[in-house]
Image (cartoon, rainbow, N blue to C red):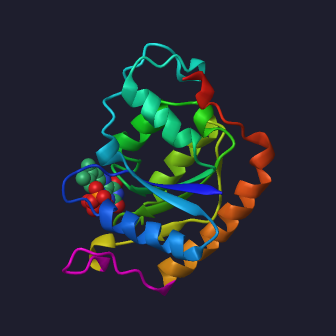
Amino acid sequence: MKLAVVIASTRPGRVGLPVGNWFYQHAQAHGKFEVALIDLAEINLPLFNEAAHPRLQQYEHEHTKDWSRRIDAVDALVFVTPEYNHSVPASLLNALDYLNKEWAYKPVGFVTYGGVSAGTRALQVAKQVVVGLRMMPIPESVNIPFVAQLIAPDGTFQAGKIQTDAADLMLDELYRWTEALQTLRQPVAAAV
Ligand SMILES: Cc1cc2nc3c(=O)[nH]c(=O)nc-3n(C[C@H](O)[C@H](O)[C@H](O)COP(=O)(O)O)c2cc1C
């Protein structure tokens, strides 16, 4: 089973990069998934600029075709996202809006972070959106409060037992859902 770990934050100096790198390495060590790291800052999608509804897959732009192929190739996703204004960053919503069938029947977990809220308000917003795309958001998540306090001077994220235990539980459950939903998933990239 292939898992994409998607770093949602794109701003210079983002905490999302060390948090995402930590989770990516943790997911690899967990061992059940083949893991790919996707950084939305590198993907660099413009604001949604396709004419046709994404469910038609009549993609005009190379960036959309590339994005479609990347998401089509994976069985499950984990979004690593901050909380911006009690919601998710526009970069994540934009990346979701670009596609439709490519997301369907894929289970999704969340690593969220922020201040006192630990990104949980962002998580609730994201759940509503991904359900509309027929993804399955699982209940287990990793929620990191006061994330800046866990960034070491060398810039790495220093996970504690709370985060590593939560990550293991989420990955175990995500794998169960990934297997269970396999019969519903079909490759859709042939259309692009
Ligand atoms: C535009 C913006 C909005 C923010 N809104 C929230 C918020 O609603 N709740 C929160 O806990 N933190 C909020 N923060 C603080 C972020 O949690 C903190 O800056 C975090 O490092 C952002 O993640 P990033 O560094 O990966 O971009 C906000 C930060 C920015 C830049």
Compared with 8, 188 (above or below) is: above
Quick one: quadrant of the C terminus? top right
Compared with 82, 23 (above or below) is: below
Residue 102 in view, yes or no: yes
Q: Residue 17 location in percent, x, y?
A: 31, 62
Compared with 101, 177 (above or below) is: below
Place residue 83 in its image quadrant. bottom left
Quick one: quadrant of the N terminus? bottom right
Is 65 or 87 nearer to us in this picture? 65
Q: Does 103 lie within the magenta span? A: no
Going by the image, does 12 lie left or right of 128?
left
Outermost bottom residue: 161
Residues in magenta, as a range: 150-161
Going by the image, does 171 lie left or right of 86?
right
Residue 144 in view, yes or no: no
Q: Kindly identify the residue that appears in the image at 32 percent across and 52 percent down.
A: 9
Q: Does 153 lie within the magenta span? A: yes
Q: Kindly identify the residue that appears in the image at 69 percent across and 42 percent down.
A: 105
Q: Kindly identify the residue that appears in the image at 71 percent across and 37 percent down.
A: 186
Is 69 or 6 nearer to us in this picture? 69
Q: Residue 114 location in percent, x, y?
A: 35, 63
Is 58 or 91 nearer to us in this picture? 58
Place residue 49 in its image quadrant. top left
Chief SS of the magenta region? loop
Q: Residue 168 location in percent, x, y?
A: 59, 75
The picture quadrant for ligand 1 comes to bottom left
Compared with 69, 147 (above or below) is: below
Is 148 or 173 nearer to us in this picture? 173
Q: Residue 38 location in percent, x, y?
A: 41, 51
Q: Kindly identify the residue that appears in the image at 50 percent across and 82 percent down.
A: 162
